[in-house]
């Protein structure tokens, strides 16, 4: 099983990636079609919420544990996750995996803020907050990324 760090890079790296492709076309989830198996309808399903940066999320289960608060890139999250492309292809998954926040793509981190431990959330991340125009393994340039994330715990470093 591949590890999420293979497909998720440091936030600093994401900031350096040009998010436009050869045709200047970053992904736009509101104008994309998703595989029926993903159950994503961003325009008509009121359960989907959009963050100011364009990342979408939908809580499947609101956890009853503490709400996640991140203090620095050195903080850690422990999650079960599955990553999908918009055609429904699974590109990565893991169970009880720990990641340092500073090594995750920014869309993944933003989508988890205020999530409660024990909660499960679906997120849709435009390429601007994913890998931009970079190809990462089987993930094409300018790809919208979809994740199902279960937050098991988080650890703040105190810095």
Image: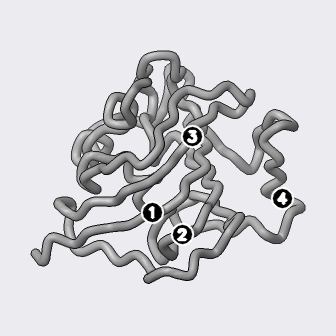
For marks 4 and 2 on the same chain, the one whose residue lies earlier in the sequence: 4
Q: Which residue position is annotated with label 1?
A: 152
For marks 3 and 1 on the same chain, the one whose residue lies earlier in the sequence: 3
Q: Is residue 28 above or below residue 56?
A: above
* Residue in view at x 74 percent, y 27 percent: 87
| Residue nearer the viewer, 82 or 108 | 82
Q: Which residue position is annotated with label 3?
A: 82
Distance, label 4 to label 2, CA atoms, is 27 Å
Distance, label 4 to label 3, CA atoms, is 23 Å
Dot 2 crowding, Cα within 10 Å, few <14, some 14–19, many 20+: some
For marks 4 and 3 on the same chain, the one whose residue lies earlier in the sequence: 4
Tag 2, which secondary structure?
loop
Distance, label 1 to label 2, CA atoms, is 6 Å
Give the image quarter of residue 88: top right
Distance, label 4 to label 1, CA atoms, is 30 Å
* Residue in view at x 87 percent, y 37 percent: 36
Distance, label 3 to label 2, CA atoms, is 16 Å
Contact? badges 4 and 2 (CB < 8 Å):
no
Distance, label 3 to label 1, CA atoms, is 14 Å
Contact? badges 1 and 2 (CB < 8 Å):
yes
Q: Residue furthest front?
A: 96
Q: Residue furthest top?
A: 138
For marks 1 and 2 on the same chain, the one whose residue lies earlier in the sequence: 2
Q: Which residue position is annotated with label 4?
A: 43
Tag 4, which secondary structure?
loop
Q: Which residue position is annotated with label 2?
A: 118
For marks 4 and 1 on the same chain, the one whose residue lies earlier in the sequence: 4
- Residue 67: mark in rendering: none
Residue 38 rendering spot, x and y as whole percentages: 78, 41
For marks 3 and 2 on the same chain, the one whose residue lies earlier in the sequence: 3
């Amino acid at each position: 099983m591949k590890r999420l760090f293979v497909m998720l890079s440091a936030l600093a790296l994401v900031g350096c990636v040009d998010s436009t492709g050869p045709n200047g076309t970053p992904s736009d989830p509101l104008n994309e079609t998703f595989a029926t198996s993903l159950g994503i309808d961003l325009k008509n399903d009121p359960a989907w919420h959009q963050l100011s940066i364009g990342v979408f999320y939908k809580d499947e289960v609101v956890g009853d544990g503490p709400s996640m608060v991140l203090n620095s890139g050195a903080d850690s999250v422990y999650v079960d996750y599955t990553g999908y492309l918009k055609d429904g292809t699974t590109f990565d998954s893991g169970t009880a995996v720990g990641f340092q926040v500073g090594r995750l793509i920014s869309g993944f981190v933003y989508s988890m803020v205020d999530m409660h431990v024990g909660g499960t959330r679906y997120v849709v991340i435009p390429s601007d907050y994913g890998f931009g125009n970079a190809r990462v393994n089987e993930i094409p340039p300018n790809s919208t990324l979809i994740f199902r994330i279960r937050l098991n715990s988080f650890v703040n470093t105190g810095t």
